[in-house]
């Protein structure tokens, strides 16, 4: 049985972040080392200590370092021979620094006004600072996107997309097929940060740029010399090579542990025994985990994995939960248009696979309290509304879907022929007249718990 089709299998053992290491293995040594840095206690050490561990583990683990050659740009600094670990480490450092500058550079966009950071603001957990459901972009900065902006944090643990996901032995039960899982973006359509970065740069409703424009902007940028130092004196002679180096640098920056996966939330402090959650937060956590109440943790994993690595608050499964249509979006003015997630139209390789229509990748809930819009179409503006949707979708559908001539138009953003794909596990196992899975006081406590997942918690000085 596939989870994506028939709802989630109960009692699936919590997966954790060894996955982090799989994807990192395809990505970069920096993240690889960060996997190592989650020691047996599942602690990640941020800042300078993470860097130290990085160097040490690069020096220690020969087989892992052999993955480095998958990063073509790394070769640029030392063509024709294998690099030493020290050279690799130095190259990663240069690319991280460049990636950061590129990330904030609006001159890469067609309008000259939009940087990655415009939509992924570091002050808001790498989500937008404004409360728009979807962001504006394009040459005139007036083109509306069709999806809400996800956080860029904790993506290091997203596995590459697969239709049949099996947990590793360290994390859970290998024999269970968890169905479609992983990949970047809401529909999992790309696997690497570099491929992903290409999407907004070229999209007509986002940065609206071209490889040529990007190459020219970088050549004229204050950091052009650093770019040459990292990728070779002649890098600007070749537009495609320059563009690829830009994409690689962005991908490398996105894996900087202390910026993108610091594990410094109040909840992490509580897991490490450094702080006690309040009564409301603890009650919220219980409801979040309780299979008969919120059952949230069945998808948004909240416990450490078997190997001790910290929870990612997502199993990265692609799931249909029947989020209402956001009628404020321009794309939705066309009544024939549906954003069906994995089966299209943004994603094209699974087109015609009806069993994948309406499924979206489960997002992490780390830093979710910093977001101003929720779900793939940004329909809700507060965590209370989101949790109420989970609790009352089936008991009080009229609160969430339009009512036409007295009839509730349930699941109005998914054509009926795909309704079999909708998840039916708790809290989605009820009908009108039943008691909601969570009452209003319980919803409040779940939200209090979600507020403990924001990074940057400073335990009071002793
Ligand atoms: C106009 C707003 C906007 C800009 C500018 C933008 N993004 Fe995004 N980003 C989005 C949206 C919307 C999504 C979700 C897209 C989807 O699901 O199809 C997204 C998704 C992502 C993801 C995948 C996140 C996940 O959960 O899988 C990454 C990584 C990312 N963006 C990086 C970047 C980088 C790097 C840049 C700059 C080159 C950038 N973005 C520029 C809006 C933006
Ligand atoms: C069956 C799997 C599943 C369960 C159970 C589940 N979620 Fe989710 N969650 C998802 C998916 C999938 C999405 C994205 C759906 C979409 O946008 O179409 C999501 C999105 C969210 C979001 C929005 C995050 C964002 O970045 O926009 C929040 C908040 C959330 N869930 C909280 C909860 C809470 C609280 C519970 C328990 C009451 C819960 N979830 C139960 C799968 C699940």
Image: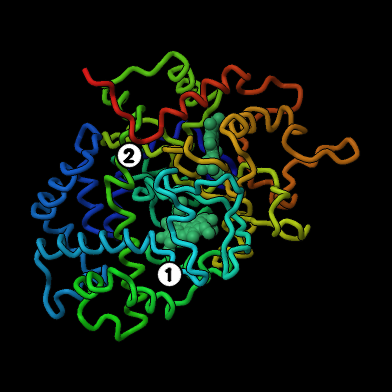
Q: Earlier in the sequence, mark 2 or mark 1?
A: 1
236 and 285: which one is in front? 236
> Local crowd at mark 2 within 10 Å, few (<14), some, or many (≥20)?
many
425 and 448: which one is in front? 448
Q: Is mark 1 within 8 Å of ligand 1?
A: yes
Q: Is residue 305 visible?
A: no
Quadrant where the C terminus sits is top left
Q: Is residue 240 above or below residue 279?
A: below
Residue 45 as seen in the image, left or right of residue 313: left
Say which element carries label 2: loop
Q: Residue at x 14, y 46 (%)?
A: 53
Residue 90 as seen in the image, left or right of residue 298: left
Image x and y of residue 12, in percent: 44, 35
Q: Look at mark 1 in the image and give the residue it sits on.
A: 108
Image x and y of residue 208, in percent: 53, 70
Q: Is residue 137 above or below residue 368?
A: below
Q: Is residue 365 above or below residue 98?
A: above
Instruction: Please tell me in which quadrant of the rendered image residue 251 appears.
Output: bottom left
Q: Residue at x 57, y 67 (%)?
A: 138
Please identify the residue farthest to the right as the structure is shown.
405
Q: Residue at x 49, y 21 (%)?
A: 284
Image x and y of residue 1, in percent: 53, 45
Colour scheme employed for the rendering of this structure? rainbow
Q: How many marks?
A: 2
Image x and y of residue 446, in percent: 51, 24
Q: Is residue 60 visible?
A: yes
331 and 234: which one is in front? 234
Q: Residue at x 37, y 75 (%)?
A: 243
Q: Look at mark 2 in the image and give the residue it sits on.
A: 171
CB atoms at circles 2 and 1 under 8 Å apart?
A: no
Q: Which mark is residue 367?
A: none
């Amino acid at each position: 049985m596939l989870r994506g089709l028939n709802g989630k299998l109960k009692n699936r053992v919590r997966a954790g972040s060894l996955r982090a290491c799989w994807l990192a293995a395809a990505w970069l040594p920096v993240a690889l080392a960060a996997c190592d840095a989650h020691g047996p206690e599942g602690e990640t050490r941020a800042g300078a200590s993470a860097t130290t561990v990085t160097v040490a583990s690069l020096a220690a683990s020969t087989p892992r370092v052999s993955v480095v050659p998958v990063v073509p740009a790394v070769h640029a600094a030392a063509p024709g021979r294998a690099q030493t670990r020290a050279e690799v480490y130095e190259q990663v450092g240069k690319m991280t620094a460049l990636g950061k500058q590129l990330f904030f550079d609006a001159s890469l966009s067609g309008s000259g006004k939009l940087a990655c950071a415009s939509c992924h603001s570091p002050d808001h957990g790498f989500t937008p600072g404004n409360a728009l459901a979807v962001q504006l972009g394009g040459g005139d900065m007036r083109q509306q996107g069709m999806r809400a902006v996800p956080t860029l944090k904790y993506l290091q643990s997203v596995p590459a997309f697969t239709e049949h996901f099996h947990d590793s032995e360290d994390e859970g039960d290998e024999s269970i097929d968890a169905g479609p899982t992983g990949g970047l973006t809401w529909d999992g359509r790309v696997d690497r940060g570099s491929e992903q970065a290409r999407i907004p740069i070229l999209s007509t409703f986002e940065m609206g740029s071209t490889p040529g424009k990007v190459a020219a902007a970088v050549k004229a940028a204050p950091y052009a010399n650093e770019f040459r130092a990292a990728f070779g004196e002649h890098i600007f002679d070749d537009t495609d090579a320059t563009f690829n180096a830009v994409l690689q640098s962005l991908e490398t920056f996105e894996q900087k542990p202390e910026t993108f996966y610091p594990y410094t939330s109040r909840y992490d402090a509580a897991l490490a025994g450094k702080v006690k959650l309040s009564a409301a937060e603890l009650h919220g956590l219980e409801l979040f985990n309780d299979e008969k109440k919120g059952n949230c943790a069945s998808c948004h994993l909240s416990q450490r994995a078997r190997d001790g690595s910290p929870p990612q608050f997502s199993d990265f499964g692609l799931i249909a939960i029947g989020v209402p249509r956001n009628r404020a979006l321009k794309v939705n003015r066309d009544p024939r248009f549906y954003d069906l997630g994995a089966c299209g139209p943004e994603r094209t390789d699974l087109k015609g696979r009806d069993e994948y229509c309406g499924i979206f990748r489960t997002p992490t809930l780390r830093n979710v309290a910093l977001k101003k819009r929720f779900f793939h179409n940004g329909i809700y503006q507060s965590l209370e509304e989101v949790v109420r949707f989970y609790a009352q979708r089936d008991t009080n559908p009229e609160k969430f879907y339009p009512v036409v001539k007295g009839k509730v138009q349930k699941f109005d953003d998914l054509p009926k022929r795909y309704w079999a794909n909708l998840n039916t596990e708790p809290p989605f196992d009820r009908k009108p007249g039943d008691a909601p899975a969570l009452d209003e006081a319980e919803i409040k406590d779940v939200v209090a718990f979600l507020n403990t997942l924001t990074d940057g918690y400073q335990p009071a000085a002793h």
